[in-house]
């Protein structure tokens, strides 16, 4: 096994070679004070090559990407030990699902949901179907060459027939559930793993009749999120207790539940039945396990890459291949050895991704994406990769330390400039997975992070972390039946802006976003109001000595007097609210295409730049302000830009 530090250093070196150079500053930057709205293009914001799935055809491993534009399938020829071809997948934001029929590879995309066929003999790629569902999560082929897709939302199963090009809707395996996250098929049945309330459903391929297979003992789990089948057995990975269930097809009452034993393990993210063993991978630890069906032998095989998600496990030539976002591990059952391979080092394309977060500490800009951050040195223009297992969703700097809120596991990392790696400080737990905002309260020295619950779960949380002692206190719920999206702290009080959305896939049960105050000394909410009628989210909050300023998801800026607990003014700035930053009596916010300057005295707004077409992951927009208050950083397309203010 390659030591993690050495692999990270090698991967970073490879990424540096493949990253595009930053562009030089405009003449206005070199000449002195810039005109407001002057844009300096700093080059691709985040360059990476995360993997979403894979499939073998012969001795070639076809690897599918996520978050690139376009996404690609790269053909790693094991005989030549290099990627020999790339196939563009021109729609969707990523590839989660792949399967094969004969020598054809089928690829399913998400946001939008399209189905592609790669003819590996001719090298041609064809879009063969499209579906209204936001996501194709999973695909499998049957022995007779049909393709089965699991989608959301809602969670349904679709059959595609390559012979005719026709699709057949097999409906929702578990009506009311949002996700079909795993799927397999044999001669007679399709097996669908469902969440966010777990089901394992067998669908008769001929009649469409459905039968629940999940034993009552585990019916309260969240998901059956991964699956593999053999002629006799089904193996499914269940959330959120890190369990594997193995049951007989003909007698589902004959089953075993196997617990993944790494500390804190929550998810079994990928499964393969091969040669009498069930191979499976856990998360968050990244541990690789196997279980022998015949006698219950259980083995921990190792941790190929700490905390990495394994998106697919495949067998080829007697060896087991685990496909992860940062690369591929290869396990040899004959020797017990594990080798880790960088797919980028083998020639897989690295390209600009859709970033997720942006932050400036004054000397560098962090751009968060899949598997870490690109860190842009503002003086030299050098870009380095800070690898983190997960997706940095929110970033801030306090007292010389940069803090990163990372999905999944609602984790908090810290990073000191110049260090090769970030340090894991905590995982929130409490069924939370998606950090939404971070802030620092100078009066108490505390770091506060807000988080969204896992899909299907209720109530977001507020995490209060003391960097001096390392103590974490989590408050859930903090605002009942809502998620805190935005934070700002002053004099021992952290102000909370909420969203009515709880876990993804769960319909909101409240109608209006709230503004609340949480006393960091008393550790309680002291008041709540609904600042803007009908608003479903407050996406960003900032404060001055006299007022709070927030912006809603539909672009309404509000001014709030915390002493009178009253909204004093509102202003429609744009159609979609994003980040809000302050500089004296001026505020700045953005949507996908423009940046707006708000005069907080006159309470008027105007565009200072437009035509950005910023390509953020999940849509929307993000901006950050340089501590000098002379510039903003955001995106134009997928490039990082500096905007003079």
Image (cartoon, rainbow, N blue to C red):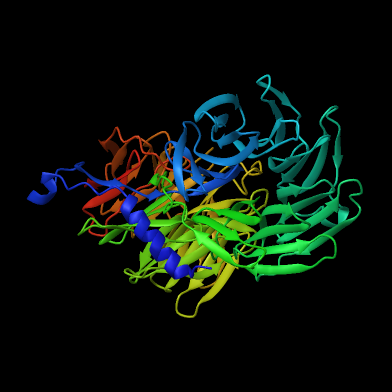
Dividing the picture into quarters, in which one does residue 155 lie? top right
For the point 82% across and 45% down, which residue is it? 231
Above or below, 230 relative to 361: above
Residue 71: x and y, percent? 46, 38
For the point 72% across and 69% down, which residue is it? 299
Q: Nearer the viewer, residue 611 or 50?
A: 50
376 sits to left or right of 226: left
For the point 83% across and 29% down, which residue is it? 208
Residue 627: x and y, percent? 26, 59
Q: Is residue 254 visible?
A: yes
Q: Nearer the viewer, residue 284 or 188?
A: 188
442 sits to left or right of 377: right
For the point 72% across and 48% down, which residue is it? 227
Q: Is residue 641 visible?
A: no
Quadrant where the N terminus is found in the figure: bottom right
Residue 212: x and y, percent? 85, 43
């Amino acid at each position: 096994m390659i030591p993690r530090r050495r692999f990270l250093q090698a991967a970073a070196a490879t990424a540096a070679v493949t990253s595009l150079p930053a562009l030089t500053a405009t003449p206005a930057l070199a000449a002195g004070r810039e005109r407001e709205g002057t844009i300096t293009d700093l080059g691709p914001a985040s360059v990476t090559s995360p993997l979403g799935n894979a499939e073998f055809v012969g001795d070639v491993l076809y690897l599918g990407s996520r978050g690139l534009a376009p996404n690609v399938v790269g053909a790693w020829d094991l005989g030549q030990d290099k990627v020999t071809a790339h196939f563009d997948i021109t729609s969707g934001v990523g590839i989660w699902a792949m399967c094969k029929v004969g020598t054809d590879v089928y690829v399913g995309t998400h946001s939008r949901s399209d189905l592609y066929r790669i003819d590996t003999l001719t090298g041609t790629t064809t879009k063969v179907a499209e579906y209204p569902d936001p996501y194709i999560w999973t695909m499998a082929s049957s022995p007779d060459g049909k393709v089965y897709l699991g989608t959301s939302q809602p969670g349904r199963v679709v059959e595609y027939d390559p012979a005719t090009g026709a699709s057949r809707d097999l409906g929702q395996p578990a009506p009311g559930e949002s996700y079909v996250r795993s799927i397999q098929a044999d001669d007679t049945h399709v097996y669908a793993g469902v969440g966010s309330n777990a089901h394992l459903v067998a669908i008769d391929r001929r009649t469409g009749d459905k039968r629940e297979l999940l034993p009552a003992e585990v019916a309260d789990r969240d998901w059956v999120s991964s699956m593999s089948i053999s002629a006799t057995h089904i193996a499914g990975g269940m959330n959120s207790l890190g369990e594997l269930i193995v049951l007989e097809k003909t007698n589902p009452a004959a089953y075993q539940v196997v617990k993944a034993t790494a500390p804190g393990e929550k998810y079994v993210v990928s499964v393969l039945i091969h040669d009498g063993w069930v191979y499976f991978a856990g998360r968050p630890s990244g541990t690789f396990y196997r279980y022998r069906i015949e006698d219950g032998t259980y083995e921990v095989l190792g941790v190929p890459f700490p905390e990495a998600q394994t998106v697919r496990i495949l067998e080829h030539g007697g060896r087991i291949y685990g496909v992860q976002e940062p690369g591929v591990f290869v396990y040899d059952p004959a020797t017990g050895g594990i080798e880790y391979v960088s797919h980028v080092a083998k020639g897989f394309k690295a390209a600009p991704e859709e970033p997720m977060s942006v932050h400036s500490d004054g000397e560098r800009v962090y751009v968060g994406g899949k598997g870490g951050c690109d860190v842009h040195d503002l003086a030299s223009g050098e870009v380095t990769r800070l690898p983190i297992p997960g997706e940095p969703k929110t970033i801030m700097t306090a007292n010389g330390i940069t803090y990163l809120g990372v999905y999944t596991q609602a984790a908090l990392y810290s990073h000191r400039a110049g260090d090769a790696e970030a340090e894991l400080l905590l995982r929130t737990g409490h069924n939370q997975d998606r950090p939404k905002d971070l802030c620092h309260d100078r009066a108490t020295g505390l770091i506060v992070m807000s988080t969204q619950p896992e899909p299907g779960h209720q109530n977001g949380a507020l995490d209060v972390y003391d960097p001096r002692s390392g103590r974490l206190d989590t408050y859930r719920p903090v605002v009942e039946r809502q998620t805190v999206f935005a934070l700002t702290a002053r004099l021992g009080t952290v102000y909370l802006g909420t969203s009515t959305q709880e876990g993804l896939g769960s319909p909101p049960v409240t109608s209006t976003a709230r503004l609340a105050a949480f006393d960091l000394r008393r550790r309680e909410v002291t008041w709540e109001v609904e600042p803007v009628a009908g608003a479903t989210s407050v996406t960003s909050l900032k404060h001055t000595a006299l007022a709070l300023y927030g912006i809603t998801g539909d672009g309404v800026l509000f001014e709030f007097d915390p002493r009178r607990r009253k909204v004093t003014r509102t202003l429609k700035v744009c159609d979609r609210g994003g980040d809000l930053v302050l500089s004296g009596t001026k505020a700045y916010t953005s949507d996908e295409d423009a940046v707006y300057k708000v005069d907080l005295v006159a309470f008027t707004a105007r565009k200072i730049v437009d035509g950005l077409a910023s390509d953020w992951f999940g849509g929307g927009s993000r901006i950050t302000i340089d501590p000098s208050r002379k510039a903003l950083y955001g995106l134009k397309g997928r490039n990082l830009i500096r905007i003079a203010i």
